[in-house]
Image (cartoon, grey):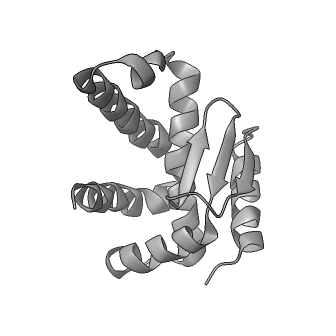
Amino acid sequence: MLYIWDIERIIRDTLNEHQLTIKYEFNNKLTTPMSYNVSTNTIKFNYLKVNGYISIMNVQLRETNENFVKLLLYHEIGYYLDFKKNKHDLRILMYGDEEEKESLKSKIETNAWEYGRTVVPQELLESYDKMRELDKMLVKE
């Protein structure tokens, strides 16, 4: 099991390695393992959700806990890179019709996976791609 300070160390070291200035913080009310907030430029994580996600996904991926946190983090970095490169009209998420909202969410999610992949080290690419496929199946359920 990873503790808060373990996850913080992995996030800090990975962000430093990629020379990214993104804040990070623990949030035990978060309903997902990790989340990127574009308004505050902050990656938030719930260590219980991270550990739960690892136990579900690691049956298929067989990565170390540290690498697993990195894989989750690379996806969140993908959101950061997407919002840095693309100026999405986020008002759609508040005021758009359902079709517009779903289209924008899908585009942002796809971009996050693609941009995140650009920072994944070669030795973790296969696991990152597999996590993406497994995540799609989990979301459908």
From the viewer's perspective, tell me whether residue 29 is left or right of residue 5: left
From the viewer's perspective, tell me whether residue 126 is left or right of residue 121: left
Q: Is residue 98 above or below residue 25?
A: above
Position of the C terminus by quadrant:
bottom left
Position of the N terminus by quadrant:
bottom right
x and y percentages locating residue 91 in the rendered image: 47, 17
- Residue occupying the point 31% across, 34% down: 106
x and y percentages locating residue 73 in the rendered image: 57, 54
Number of numbered labels in the structure image: 0
- Residue occupying the point 41% across, 25% down: 93
x and y percentages locating residue 44 in the rendered image: 65, 52
Q: Is residue 140 above or below residue 96?
A: below
- Residue occupying the point 38% across, 77% down: 56
- Residue occupying the point 34% across, 37% down: 110
Q: 9 or 37: which is nearer to us?
A: 37
Q: 109 or 85: which is nearer to us?
A: 109
x and y percentages locating residue 123 in the rendered image: 47, 62
* Residue 4 shows in this picture: yes
* Residue 119 shows in this picture: no
Q: In the picture, residue 41 is in which quadrant?
A: top right
Q: Residue placed farthest to the bottom in the image?
A: 1
Q: 13 or 100: which is nearer to us?
A: 100
Q: 74 or 121: which is nearer to us?
A: 74
